[in-house]
Amino acid sequence: MNNKALLGVFAILITTIGAVAFAGLTIISSATAQEYNGTATGNLTMGAANMTDTNMTNGTGNISGVEDPDF
């Protein structure tokens, strides 16, 4: 395998690792926001992490679109 091919494989590997890490962070921030969804930050993070119509529209921070009664 020549240098260009090796470099290509390496680039793909790094990109894949980056994408997986980003997905992991998104899931973590989503879970954290759900825990603290009584706060403005929680609502914003949750909406951004899920990118669903429900969250982006009503800003409740819950996937169902219904506020968590605990808060």
Image (cartoon, grey):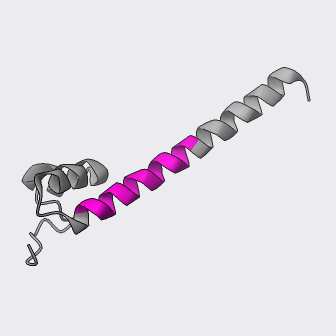
Identified at 77% across, 26% down, the residue is 7
Q: Main secondary structure of the magenta part?
A: helix
Residue 47: in sight, yes or no?
yes
Q: Which residues are magenta?
A: 18-33
Name of the residue lying farthest toward the right: 1
Q: Is residue 21 magenta?
A: yes
Left or right of 66? Residue 34 is right
The answer to whether 21 is drawn above or below residue 37 in the figure is above
Name which quarter of the figure residue 43 lies in: bottom left
Left or right of 62? Residue 25 is right
Quadrant placement of the C terminus: bottom left
Q: Tell me how many marks there are.
A: 0
Quadrant placement of the N terminus: top right
Q: Nearer the viewer, residue 12 or 68?
A: 68
The x, y position of residue 50, in whole percent, is: 29, 54
The answer to whether 43 is drawn above or below residue 12 in the figure is below
The x, y position of residue 26, in whole percent, is: 38, 52
Residue 52: in sight, yes or no?
no
Left or right of 4? Residue 17 is left
Identified at 33% across, 55% down, the residue is 29
The x, y position of residue 33, in whole percent, is: 24, 60
Identified at 39% across, 58% down, the residue is 27
The x, y position of residue 15, in whole percent, is: 60, 37
Identified at 53% across, 44% down, the residue is 19
Q: Is residue 52 magenta?
A: no
Name of the residue lying farthest toward the bottom: 70
Q: Nearer the viewer, residue 66 or 21?
A: 21
Name of the residue lying farthest toward the top: 4
Name which quarter of the figure residue 4 lies in: top right
